[in-house]
Amino acid sequence: MNLNDIKVFISVIEAESFAGASKVLSMPSTTVSRKVQMLEENLGVKLVHRSTRKLSLTEEGLSYFQLCQQHIVAIEEANDFIMQAQAEPKGKIRITSPLDFAIEYVQPWIVEFLKQYPEISIELDTSDSYVDMVEARIDIAFRSGTLKDSSLIARRIGPKQNVCCASPELLKAKGGIRTPEDLEKHDCLIMGKSLAQNTWQFIKEGKILDVSVTGRYASNSMNLVIKSALNGLGVAYVPIALIKPYLDNGQLTLVLKNYGTPVSNMFIIYQSHRYMAKPIRFFVDHVMEKVTPKPPWAM
């Protein structure tokens, strides 16, 4: 069986005519017709109903087309995969990430990666909003929470957990915080557009405690909330991943250590292709190396 004849047959069906396939393949129509006829003779079945007005598949032709189309695509992907494996990784990666996470982690990862692979380029979109990866032509996303699209692959890169913290100067001036109720004595920094109706969650002995907090400053920028905490403006309830460096160097102090907080996961997400493009695969591997055996923000 000639594989080229099968590819010609698939092109005819996709183009819906011998003339259309002739243009796609840069091959005379007579040659296209002859190759399909030879394929039918080799198979011993009629694949295509021919008429002067239109072309249609027989029942056997439809089944044969669907099966062959899947395998041809797989063969082409395999060929691309092998060719990429032999060559220097080259191409563009489109990435989306929440801004604050990108500043702290994704950007340093990208800088190191681009220095290592000069033939690869990256477009980074910093957005906290949900992005349809297929529609937006995004290759890689950094996101937390539940994966909405089952056709995507999500690999956990670490926990996402808010913790309560404040500057040492604030705690010295205003007093310590031993229980969530002590937060009532402090100005709390609110993540959001409004100071009204804000609740922080804590966990003690398996029970969830919802604590209402108030303050004099609210911002929908996590980066600004953290800077405000560093400046002693109030107590913050922010992701551990974004403040770990400040806890390590003593600029911020963890409070309510005896209370837990809800934990979710942070993922690197990419589209499910049987053969992933080499630049994408290399970047995913690069990130996984950075978070294995534990992410840099792990306590």
Image: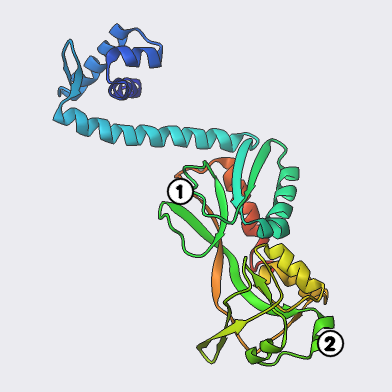
Is there a contact, CB below 8 Å, between mark 1 and mark 2?
A: no
Q: Is residue 238 left or right of residue 51?
A: right
> Residue 272 has which mark?
1
**Residue 141 in picture, x, y percent from top left:** 56, 52
Residue at the image position 52 percent from the left and 54 percent from the top: 130
Q: What residue is disc 2 on?
A: 173
Q: How crowded is the residue under tag 2: few (<14 C-alpha within 10 Å), some, or many (20+)?
A: few
Classify the position of the C terminus by image quarter: bottom right
**Residue 145 in picture, x, y percent from top left:** 51, 65
Residue at the image position 81 percent from the left and 76 percent from the top: 232
Amino acid type, mark 2: Ala
Can residue 194 be spotted in the picture? yes
Instruction: Pick the residue in front: 146 or 181.
Output: 181
Toward which corner of the image does residue 129 lie, by quadrant?
bottom right
Residue at the image position 26 percent from the left and 12 percent from the top: 33
Toward which corner of the image does residue 242 lie, by quadrant?
bottom right
Q: How crowded is the residue under tag 1: few (<14 C-alpha within 10 Å), some, or many (20+)?
A: few
**Residue 40 in picture, x, y percent from top left:** 20, 20
Q: Is residue 256 left or right of residue 278?
A: right
Toward which corner of the image does residue 52 lie, by quadrant?
top left
The tag earlier along the polypeptide, 1 or 2, is: 2
